[in-house]
Amino acid sequence: MSYEDVKTSGKPIPRGLQECIPDYRDIHDVPVPNYTEEEHGTWKLLLENQKVVLPNRACREFVDGLDQIPFPKEQIPRLADISDAIEAHTGWKLMRVDGLVPDKEFFHLLAERIFPSTDFIRERSELGYTPSPDMFHDLLGHVPLLIDKRFTAFFEKFGIAGVNAFKRGHAGTKMLPRIYWYTVEFGLIQNPAGLRIYGAGIVSSPNEVLYALSEQPKKHTFNIDTIAAKPYDIWHMQEELFVIPSFDELENEFERWAKKEGLL
């Protein structure tokens, strides 16, 4: 997601979409917020909701990752504990942020195998859907695939391409957020068992999970050149989605595109 796209939308910017500076302290040195009982309860409800809707809808790679992450059922987890679990599998780590990291810094973090995560939870009224990425979106949505070596190979290259785009003043600074949106956030994948979800914006939202696999949104064959030119709107459920055949194909097609653009 591009902060520039949010900033120029003309809409009020909620907390999780406000521009922020990453907290560069070691994640173990970052104080844990004093969450309220209601906030812990919101985490519990969100987790329970997703455990109902994700079976046979989330992709195999996501489910495998979710099984290996120590998400507590009754209370909000410490970012440091989740970061340690990721690092043990792929070497990736979490960094605490207050909101949306500007694109240039975001690409640098990914290139260094660091994923930024907020540490606040959404309002109880936003259980079904929120346009603002809270920690449930960041943790439940993104973390399971951060322990998948196929996905993280693509993700690291994505970050490197973004760093190079900013260094060279390349149009990729505009195209890469679109690729991110239609893959990392709202991507579908054709698993052997059928059409499944892998995008974090879908798997972290009960409403999006059911909507994405319904007949309502248009589902397109994955074409990275089309995606790189396609605008998106964060303020409602997505009406067009793209289906990758595999994470190998995602990485290979991204690498082909990035080399063609001179970014890798």
Image (cartoon, grey):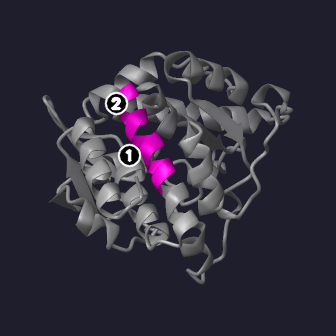
Q: Report helix, strand or loop for mark 1.
A: loop
Q: Residue at x 68, y 45 (%)?
A: 118
Residue 88 shows up from this direction:
yes
**Left or right of 212: which side holds 129?**
right
Coordinates of residue 233 in the picture (x, y in percent):
43, 71
Q: Nearer the viewer, residue 22 or 208?
A: 22
Coordinates of residue 133 in the picture (x, y in percent):
59, 52
* Residue 245 quadrant: top left
Disc on res. 129: none
Q: Which residues are magenta?
A: 149-161
Q: Nearer the viewer, residue 158 or 52?
A: 158
Q: Nearer the viewer, residue 17 or 226?
A: 226
**Left or right of 198: which side holds 21?**
right
Q: Nearer the viewer, residue 58 or 51?
A: 58
Predominant secondary structure, magenta span = helix
Using the image, determine if residue 189 lies above or below residue 80: below
Using the image, determine if residue 196 lies above or below residue 73: below
Q: Amino acid at mark 1?
A: Gly
Coordinates of residue 144 in the picture (x, y in percent):
46, 29
Is-magenta flag for residue 159? yes
* Pointer 1 residue: 199
1 and 2 marks in contact (CB < 8 Å): no
* Pointer 2 residue: 150
